[in-house]
Image (tube, rainbow, N blue to C red):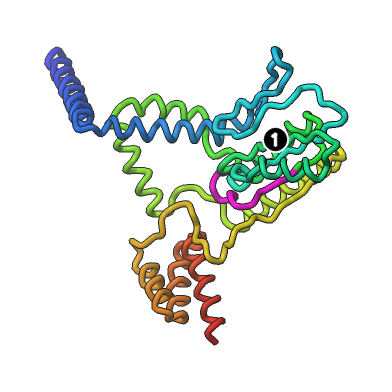
């Protein structure tokens, strides 16, 4: 019995020493520093997209009587808690299109058109926000007595799910990522899942259904509060813009050959190749985009 215990002790000690050795080697090789940098990015991304969205966008600043933006990376400005009756308060909400919109130029234009009124423009656009997250922002800002809300939304519906993470599981994984061994294995597994299209994604019909659903919610609650609402189509030339997120699957032979056919203006062959690829990966956004381009270019020539 003692021999068995002693053997188990030595085996356990050997495993611990082996793990410690691998951990030390990875850290010495700089692997841990690179993973630490990646973790900072992913943790910030998680916070912005799955944690902050359920917190207040603005907080009261009692000393000066203002609402202050408290969301990470927001461009919103502070504005008075008590609104002057002569003030026109306009909110801009949406994703990166709203975020990059020149509210300064817009403010100048509105002020010139209505010189006898004070105009406030508060831009609450957030990069990556889909219609669900825009809807959450709207529910809050309706309490700040807006006179007009402008919505830019529609180009982020494929980026994030409504509740894409299990918070308990995420925090547990975050704890284990302190280990270089765990982090290295996690990176390899995630790469395989991404390459094989095994990561969870909403299909196109689900994304469009959700998009319509939250736009209707936005319209409904604005109408109930009698707040004028402008829904803007996105000022983007989608025909000539390939998907911005992700990498085309050039590792796949069907996709690569179809893309070459498209570039060489062999449109019938390109259409056939992209269709063959989509039979295996029906939701691939790059194949869908280039298939549309092949159809479009083929019609122009014929």
What percent of the width, then of the height, locates residue 205? 62, 58
Where, quadrant-wise, is the N terminus in this rendering? top left
Asked if residue 31 lies left or right of residue 93, the reply is left
Instruction: Judge whether residue 38 can be spotted in this image.
Output: yes
In the displayed orientation, state which residue is furthest to the bottom.
302
CA neighbours of label 1 inside 10 A, class few (<14), some (14 to 19), many (20+): many
Q: Is residue 26 above or below residue 82?
A: below
Which one is nearer the viewer's eye here, 251 or 123?
123
Specify the quadrant of the image occupied by residue 224.
top right
Residue for point 63% across, 44% down: 102
In the displayed orientation, state which residue is furthest to the left.
3
Residue for point 74% across, 17% down: 65
Instruction: Judge whether residue 130 can be spotted in this image.
Output: no
Q: Label 1's element?
A: strand
Residue for point 67% across, 53% down: 209
Taking the magenta stretch, the answer to whether it contains residue 151 is yes
Which one is nearer the viewer's eye here, 296 or 198?
296
Q: Which residue is mark 1?
A: 122
Residue for point 74% across, 45% down: 109
What percent of the width, then of the height, locates residue 51? 57, 30
Magenta stretch: dominant secondary structure: loop
What percent of the width, then of the height, locates residue 287? 47, 65
Asked if residue 102 lies left or right of residue 140, the reply is left
Taking the magenta stretch, the answer to whether it contains residue 228 is no
Q: Is residue 57 above or below residue 267?
A: above
Where, quadrant-wise, is the C terminus in this rendering? bottom right
What percent of the width, then of the height, locates residue 180? 28, 30
Where are the magenta residues, as a range?
Answer: 150-161
Which one is nearer the viewer's eye here, 126 or 32?
126
The total number of labels drawn is 1
Asked if residue 301 lies left or right of residue 85, the reply is left
């Amino acid at each position: 019995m003692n021999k068995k215990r002693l053997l188990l002790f030595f085996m356990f000690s050997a495993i611990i020493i082996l793990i410690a050795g691998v951990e030390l080697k990875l850290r010495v090789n700089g692997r841990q520093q690179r993973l630490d940098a990646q973790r900072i990015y992913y943790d910030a991304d998680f916070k912005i997209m799955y944690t902050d969205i359920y917190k207040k966008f603005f907080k009261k600043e009692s000393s000066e009587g203002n609402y202050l933006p408290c969301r990470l990376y927001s461009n919103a400005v502070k504005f008075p808690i008590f609104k002057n009756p002569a003030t026109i308060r306009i909110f801009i909400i949406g994703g990166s299109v709203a975020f990059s919109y020149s509210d300064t130029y817009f403010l100048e234009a509105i002020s010139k058109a209505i010189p006898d009124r004070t105009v406030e423009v508060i831009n609450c656009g957030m990069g990556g926000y889909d219609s669900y997250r825009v809807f959450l922002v709207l529910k809050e800002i309706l309490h700040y007595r807006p006179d007009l809300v402008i919505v830019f939304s529609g180009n982020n519906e494929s980026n994030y799910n409504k509740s894409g993470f299990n918070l308990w599981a995420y925090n547990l994984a975050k704890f284990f990522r302190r280990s270089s061994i765990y982090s290295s294995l996690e990176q390899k597994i995630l790469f395989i899942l991404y390459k094989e299209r095994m990561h969870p994604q909403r299909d196109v019909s689900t994304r469009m259904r959700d998009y319509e659903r939250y736009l209707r919610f936005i319209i409904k609650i604005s109408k109930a509060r009698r707040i004028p609402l402008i829904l803007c189509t996105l000022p983007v030339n989608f025909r000539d813009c390939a998907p911005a997120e992700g990498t085309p699957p050039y590792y796949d032979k069907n996709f690569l050959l179809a893309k070459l056919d498209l570039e060489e203006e062999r449109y019938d062959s390109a259409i056939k190749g992209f269709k063959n690829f989509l039979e295996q990966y029906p939701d691939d956004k790059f194949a869908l985009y280039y298939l549309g381009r092949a159809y479009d270019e083929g019609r122009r020539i014929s």
